[in-house]
Image: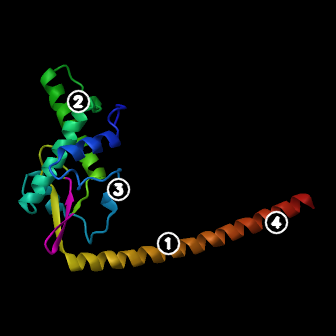
Amino acid sequence: MRKNDATFENVISGVRHQLSDEGVRIAETPTPFNLAWWPNSPSVTEQLLSDYGVPSGPKQLTEEFDAEVKAIHERLDELGHVPEVAKWQKTKDQNARRMYASLNQRAEALSVWEHIAFPLRRRGDVVFRISAPRDVLGGRPLVDALHVDDFIRGVSLQTVRDKLELARLHRHLSLWRLAAGAGAAAVLFLVLA
């Protein structure tokens, strides 16, 4: 975001007020939600189908996604945010410039959505993960589904793996600190001797 008024904080507050649910699906600060556990990434076929507007999930989730992206887009406009224009988009044609500005604004709205919207949604016993489409020309969001029990099992297993990896890394860090301390002591001894 280039303009000072178009900070994540200002965008988030405006989007939260604009949505019908008071923005409970919007985070308070930007977060890399794409790192949240999920068993697989969207397949190439799913990505290609989303580019052509083929729905991949419940209509309500697509509508929520569209409302969120629209609110972000409008908030960026309200804040006077002007997206950067690529060199190849620079032209004297006024209509083309407006079109590129709109496409770039949508691309930025999708990017902001990926940082502030919770992509996991629960409907009954199913957890859905929404991913932004690759195509800014109105592609549909990618929606994957997982039974809530499978999701809880997968998150639990991943949490255990993460904690074990953190413990292993802490042990390695302690060993390197010990080696660095011993090396510093040896250098100090050699210098003073």
User: Please, is residue 116 above or below residue 99 in the view?
Assistant: below
Work out how far the residue at label 3 is from the one at label 1, CA to CA, in angstroms.
19 Å
Query: Of tags 4 and 3, which is closer to the observer?
Result: 3
Work out how far the residue at label 4 is from the one at label 2, CA to CA, in angstroms.
61 Å
**Can residue 63 be seen from the camera position used here?**
yes
**Mark 1 or 4, nearer chain start:** 1
**Mark 3 or 1, nearer chain start:** 3
| Residue to which mark 3 is pinned | 32
Coordinates of residue 38 in the picture (x, y in percent): 27, 69
Quadrant of the drawing holding the C terminus? bottom right
Of helix, strand and loop, which one carries label 1? Answer: helix
| Residue to which mark 4 is pinned | 186
Residue at 28% in and 41% down: 11
| Residue to which mark 1 is pinned | 166
User: What's under tag 3, amino acid-wise?
Assistant: Pro
The quarter holding residue 160 reads bottom left
Report if the CB atoms under discs 4 and 2 are less than 8 Å apart: no
Q: Which residues are magenta?
A: 121-132
| Residue to which mark 2 is pinned | 89
